[in-house]
Image (spheres, rainbow, N blue to C red):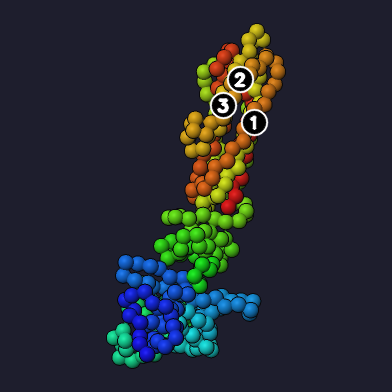
Amino acid sequence: MTAPDPTKPWAGYIQDQQYTAFQDRMIQIGKVNHQATVSGLNTRNGVFLGGGDGNSNINLNVRSNGGMNLLIDAGSAIIDGYSVINPIQAALTIAPSTSTARRDAVILRVYDTEAGDAVSKTQLEIVKGTTTSDPPLPARCLLLAVVDVAANAVSVTPSDRRKFTTSVGGVVPYYGTRPDITTIANGQIVHSLDTMQNDQRDGDNYYPLGANYNNHVYYSTATAEIIGVGVWAYKNAYINLSRVANLVLIHCTINFHQQDPNLSSVCEWGWDWDGAGGLLQTINNGSTYQYGRSMMHSAFGVVSRAAAGQHQITAHIKPTLGNGIEATNWTITAIALS
């Protein structure tokens, strides 16, 4: 039997060939969310979420067990192509506290003589820190939690630092900040275990999925305002987006009537987004409006893939003929969908 050359394209488990442990890991990498770089293939390291227990995110969770003791739940992970299993709940103990505060790290580590280690094994470990910052971590390990050990502490509480992975094309779950976008395939979805929000990578950005209300704004004023010919009158409303919104629906209205009984007016009317001016402005200047006749203009619009942060929505009107109008009852309504 011959072994395929790992530096050239090869297929896993062809009849009458033999495979090294390295090549087995390469086969695992092909099945798991991975990255292709100029130096080769590597996995997106992380914990696999299980299922069926109603609380699948307990996998490899680190929890307090009284005093300086910890428990690490069963679970599975992948670390640089190594498939790692913790079959039952395990116990670890934080080293005694001193008069100086420090931060320790709880890790799942792979040792391999092929990679230069003295032994080949896999184990849960505590990396003892010397400061209150994250301690340096060894190669081929996965950070599960950090533990802040106060001066002269008699008990500790771990802070979850797990990151998760999935099979190729699967949904990647996460806590806190979304995964580094360079570790997610284009078109792949990530799922927040905190907010239940789903986002999809599209090029160099994440875009939210679903139709949950993100934010909305309603602005209204009934103050009468005299507007002369050639003068823009406008009102502003502001919407704050906590994240990118796939779609912002906008509706603006204004009531007005002509001031001179002997003249008619022509008005330009519209709205814009973040001061874009005519870029998103709706123009209506094809009708005349007689004195004493109350009119209402209504403008609808949408903004797609609106960035997170505060945005200004402006409703505006300008008489272009006649001698002016009296405007009142402005409203601006916007709803962001994500």
Q: Residue at x 53, y 31 (%)?
A: 281
Q: Position of residue 320 (x, y in %)?
A: 55, 17
Q: Mark 3 = which residue? A: 283
265 is higher (above) or lower (below) than 107: above
Q: Position of residue 95 (x, y in %)?
A: 39, 86
> Amino acid under label 1?
Ser
> Amino acid under label 2?
Gly
SS assignment at label 3: loop
313 is higher (above) or lower (below) than 85: above
Given this view, does label 1 or label 3 mark the residue nearer the observer? Answer: 3
Residue nearest the observer in this picture, 169 or 217? 169
Q: What is the C-alpha distance between the residues marked 1 and 2?
A: 15 Å
Q: Local crowd at mark 2 within 10 Å, few (<14), some, or many (≥20)?
A: few
Looking at the image, residue 237 sits to the left or right of residue 257; the answer is left
Q: What is the C-alpha distance between the residues marked 3 and 2?
A: 9 Å
Q: What is the C-alpha distance between the residues marked 1 and 3?
A: 11 Å
Q: Report if residue 3 is visible in the image.
A: yes
Asked if the residue at tag 2 contacts the one at tag 1, i.e. Cβ–Cβ closer than 8 Å, the answer is: no
Q: Mark 1 = which residue? A: 298
- The outermost residue toward the bottom is 119
Q: Earlier in the sequence, mark 1 or mark 2?
A: 2
Q: Earlier in the sequence, mark 1 or mark 3?
A: 3
Given this view, does label 1 or label 2 mark the residue nearer the observer? Answer: 2
Q: Residue at x 62, y 53 (%)?
A: 211
* Mark number, residue 286: 2
